[in-house]
Image: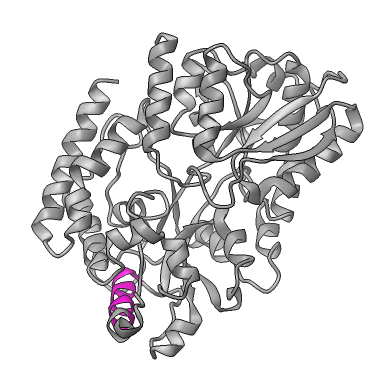
Amino acid sequence: MNIRKFLALVMALIMTASLAACGGGGGGNTAAPSGDDSSGSGNSGGGGSSAGLQVAIWDNNQLAGLKEIADAWSAESGVPVTINVITWDSYWTLLSSGASGGTMPDVFWMHSNTAQMYMENDLLLNLDDYIANDPAIDLANYYPGIVSLYSSNGSQYALPKDHDTIALLYNQALFDKYGVDAPTDDWNWDNVYEAAKAITEAGAADGVYGYAMNTSNNQDGWYNFVYDYGAQVITDDHKGTTIGSDQGKAGMEMVRKILTVSAPQPVVAETGTDSLFQSNLCAMITQGSWMINSFYTAEGHDNYKWAILPYGDANANGVCDPGERQSSYNGLGWAAAASTANPDAAYGLISAFCSEEGQKKQAELGVTMAAIPGISDAFSDAFPGMDVSAFNRIEEEGTLFFRPYTRNTTVWEDKIQQDAFLAAWLNPADEAVMAAACDNAQSIIETAIAQE
């Protein structure tokens, strides 16, 4: 792909990508840099140079914890590090400008929507030799979906930074006010529908809705329904989809049903699900683990409770059978620019973030859950007074599926959002519209994959 076409694709992504955190943008972003320097050369691969490293991220909620890890790293090697927090749109503009001949950050986050394009255009530092000589890094230790995401033609171009899961967030005060029983671990999506219906009806005079779903946020929203009912947005081999199957339609029918008793999409588009929730105008939303801090520090947080993600009772037996409670997971990658003037130090910093020690520290500080399975227990203890264990427990009590992607994810992802499901989002009362949308989405995805 030539660089002009590459930049056009990146800019198209910027204009249309949904904000889903480890799945995308996320709250708490700021255009301002941290203003602080840390120093350090990595656990391994660090060059010990005095030249500084510029690091770019897009989530201000993670800044303090990441800076603490970078400070410890820098104290050993003397390489100053400046971590700049940049808004989602500006972040990708910065990287695309660097790709066209400007200056890229030395170290930065990669995302599932864009990784393939950056890797194929030789814009990321090949990490193979560094990994081979780094005793702190073993790719077999990480969630395999994240490792695979950041590899191309047999080479690794980013190390797994984190992983995330999804949970149900509810406002206990609103449930109490309207006399509705609060969510439990036994809830399925029908229970969510019934509770949402009851609160929406009881709260009509107050402008309160029982549920709100941002349909453009697929990772923390409707993707999970599709998998709960036995279908896949993208098959495991990344060459097909079953969203138009009976199972896929069953999952999307449950989405449609819940939307009929939720905040209308024009309201969600204008206000946002998080704002509706924090304004006490919505009793339930789903959110990713990357957003915990936004609610933990919000006014009224004492009323905010996290429940394990409900299940889809696909066989209507009233029991959560294997595969019926699924949460999407995604993971960012720490990458370095192929053009960095200090590749040894850049890898050293990446290694410090991604080593088991760095991953444990990240969880302890409440930055995000680790990219290495089994070491994120401390994350549940990072928010005193708020029980966030639902994000960890779903890994034992449910099933994780990696956020669906193909070589050019945004081509089909944006098209099914606008051309397949938009009418169903806006008119959830019509069951036939949703069923037809699933058929349309099946065709769109299959066509896009065939053209990749």
Q: Is residue 415 magenta?
A: no
Task: Say left or right for 178 vs 248.
Answer: right
Looking at the picture, does residue 109 appear above or below residue 424? above
Q: Nearer the viewer, residue 379 or 326?
A: 379
The C terminus sits in image quarter: top left
> Which residue sits furthest left?
432
Q: How many marks?
A: 0
Residue at the location (41% across, 8% down)? 2
Q: How is the image coloured?
A: one colour
Q: Nearer the viewer, residue 252 or 54?
A: 54
- Magenta residues span 188-199
Task: Say left or right for 315 vs 181.
Answer: left
Q: Residue 283's x, y, as percent? A: 42, 75
Residue at the location (73% across, 55% down)? 364
Looking at the picture, does residue 250 appear above or below residue 206? above
Residue at the location (29% across, 29% down)? 239
Q: Residue 298's x, y, as percent? A: 60, 68
Picture quadrant where residue 136 is located: top right
> Which residue sits furthest top?
2
